Amino acid sequence: MIWIAGRQVNPLMLQAEWGLNDVQQEIVHRMAASRDVFEYASADVLRFELKLRDHLVKSARALYMSGIAFSDFENSRSNPEFWEQTELGGFRLRPGVPPSRGIIDIFQNGRLYATECATAMVIILYHAVLKSIREADFERLFADMILYDWRYDQDLDLQTLPTNTFLPGDILYFANPDYDPSKPHWQGENAVFLGGGLYYGHGAGIRTAPSLIAFLNENRRPGAMRSAYLVSQATRPGFAYLAPFDNMRGSISYVDHRGGFPDILETGVRIKAEIGSFYWEG
């Protein structure tokens, strides 16, 4: 269900009023069909989330096409013009390099880079946020950037929630409990849900869920009996936290001057569900 300012949203009207693309249409229809409650203080926050989710999907596809290689931390590499290699195999932004330039270079010169799947997810998050907020705010919020595993700036406001409602732009996790000990990097795969039944996992490529599970199953220990599986959780940036930095903020408003949203909201009994929250790294 989708609620804005205490009233339930009709997703069909939202689609008609806002001119949503295919990815965004899938997002709102999945939200509306879910038992989870997606609640927003204003229409602008939902609009920003739809934009950022769309950019997360586009950034995942762009990283896949960039030529960036898959590697463990020991064999990671980066463009020395923009990044310094840390002892643990991460990338530290060189002094004087704007964070936006460092992130953009990964997508422009991907063949100079190699890393594992968790770092790739954080790179996608930064790139999508860069496309969604004002550049000056990005430079300020994410100064002194380090890319390493699930290390990330607190201003991404990442949250991992238990859920079975997966939305395009969510970062999901496929666990492989009986992974081959000689291949510890395949104990699981972080993946961006692209919508349309497709997922991008760095090192595994763009696949359906059954194909990604089959890929992980090929990397189990001899005699393994347990299959890899998709974990019932989703990692998401803080959409409401980042919305005030929206690079379109002030140019478009969907708030009716009478204080309502007459074309996109419908009346009804309000039902809220608590789905809880927890933090997970892997």
Image (cartoon, rainbow, N blue to C red):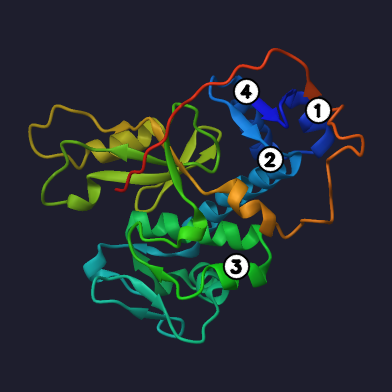
Q: Quadrant of the N terminus?
A: top right
Residue type indicated by callout 3: Phe
Q: Where is mark 1, residue-wise? A: 264
**CA gap, disc 3 to disc 2?**
20 Å
Q: Where is mark 4, residue-wise? A: 1
Q: Residues within 10 Å of mark 4 (few under 14, many from 20)?
A: many
Residue 140 vertical placement versus 219 (above, below): below
Q: Are marks 3 and 2 in contact (CB under 8 Å)?
A: no
Q: Residues within 10 Å of mark 3 (few under 14, many from 20)?
A: many
**CA gap, disc 2 to disc 4?**
13 Å
Residue type indicated by callout 4: Met
Residue type indicated by callout 1: Ile
Please, what secondary structure does the residue beneath circle 1 have? loop
Please, what secondary structure does the residue beneath circle 4 have? loop
Q: Are marks 2 and 4 in contact (CB under 8 Å)?
A: no
Q: Residues within 10 Å of mark 1 (few under 14, many from 20)?
A: many
Q: Can you give x and y, in whole percent of width and height, for residue 84 in the image? A: 36, 81
Q: Can you give x and y, in whole percent of width and height, for residue 167 in the image? A: 54, 35
Residue type indicated by callout 2: Leu
**In the displayed structure, does residue 232 sit left or right of residue 168?**
left
In the foreground, 257 or 13: 257
- N-terminal label among 4 and 3: 4
Q: Where is mark 3, residue-wise? A: 138
- N-terminal label among 2 and 4: 4
Q: Residue at x 51, y 59 (%)?
A: 155
Q: Residues within 10 Å of mark 2 (few under 14, many from 20)?
A: many
Q: Can you give x and y, in whole percent of width and height, for residue 61 in the image? A: 53, 52
**CA gap, disc 4 to disc 1?**
13 Å
- N-terminal label among 1 and 3: 3
